[in-house]
Amino acid sequence: MLTASAVLLAALLALHGLVPDLPGRPGSLLETFLPWLGLLIPVQIGAAVLRRSAVASFAALLPVAAWLALFGALPLSGPPGTPGAEGGRALLAVQHNVADDNPDPAGTARALAAAGADLIALEELTPAALPSYRTVLAAGYPYHVVHGTVGLWSRYPLTDARPVDIRPAGVGPEWNRGLRATARTPRGEIAVYVAHLPSLRMGAHGFGSARRDESAVRLGAAVAAEASERVLLLGDLNGTVDDRGLAPVTSRLTAPGSGFAFSWPARFPLARIDQVLARSATVTRVWSLPRTGSDHLPVAARVTL
């Protein structure tokens, strides 16, 4: 029994992509919380030791190897703010879903500005809170663009700004959650996308991701059609980089090289659904910032051009 359970755990980790996405999306649900399967590994090892079974002990090493192959490099990044070998070729980007019910938008803006980022992407901006973000961020970020409920603030000039239509079918034109702009940085130009994909819903029929997945297809198509070589995507994608529902996006961009940076929910973060992804650039590390008035944690990333 112990041997079989260890083999099953290793298989779920190593072959999670083979779990069928039946109605209810069990595959996406598994992939959303995939790193947490590692909590079962000490239980497996402890049980094998207590049983004094050589076969069970050997089998318990299989999920260890599978977990390390998937996530072993992620926790190895240095503390936030440690200069990397990329030096002056790096950008610092911050991504944050600020929450439309945030009780202190000005305080949230001050906290984000204190991170010293070059680019700040925000989602769930409301007409009532937007003036607070504009006022607080104006001094350090003289360039910004807002479309619907998403916005981008930059230390460097922004050009070619335009909306990106990522609406799933049946959603009206008032639903505006995507934009694109070119940031003219000292390290060269980069096309920056800001996106907020539809939320997931857990219900009687399982993991409700159909609208999120459809929006991801539209966002992936926009990235694929992007003429600029360098692309940076900042957004609340309502999914982890392991979630197959985001494959239309993640297959075209690269994920961070280190750092778990769980961002949701803020009280007890279980998953990073706020993403910083790149093309022809490298997100060398990513980390979570202190909690604001949102139900998400801000995520910071160092991007090497």
Image: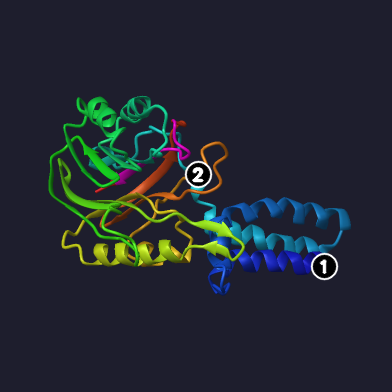
Q: Position of residue 4 (x, y in %)?
A: 76, 69
- Pick the quarter of the image with the N terminus: bottom right
Which kind of residue does numbered mark 1 sit on? Met
Q: What residue range appears in magenta?
A: 293-303
Residue shown at 26% from the left, 41% from the top: 91
Say left or right for 204 vs 288: right
Q: In this view of the protein, which residue sits in the foreground, 270 or 12? A: 270
Say left or right for 258 vs 88: right
Residue shown at 52% from the left, 49% from the top: 271
Residue located farthest toward the right when viewing the structure as drawn: 51
Which residue corresponds to mark 2? 264
Q: Secondary structure at mark 1?
A: loop
Say left or right for 190 vs 18: left
Residue 283 visible in the current orientation:
yes
Which residue corresponds to mark 1? 1
Asked if the residue under mark 1 is in contact with the one under mark 2, i.e. CB atoms within 8 Å, the reply is no
Q: Secondary structure at mark 2?
A: loop
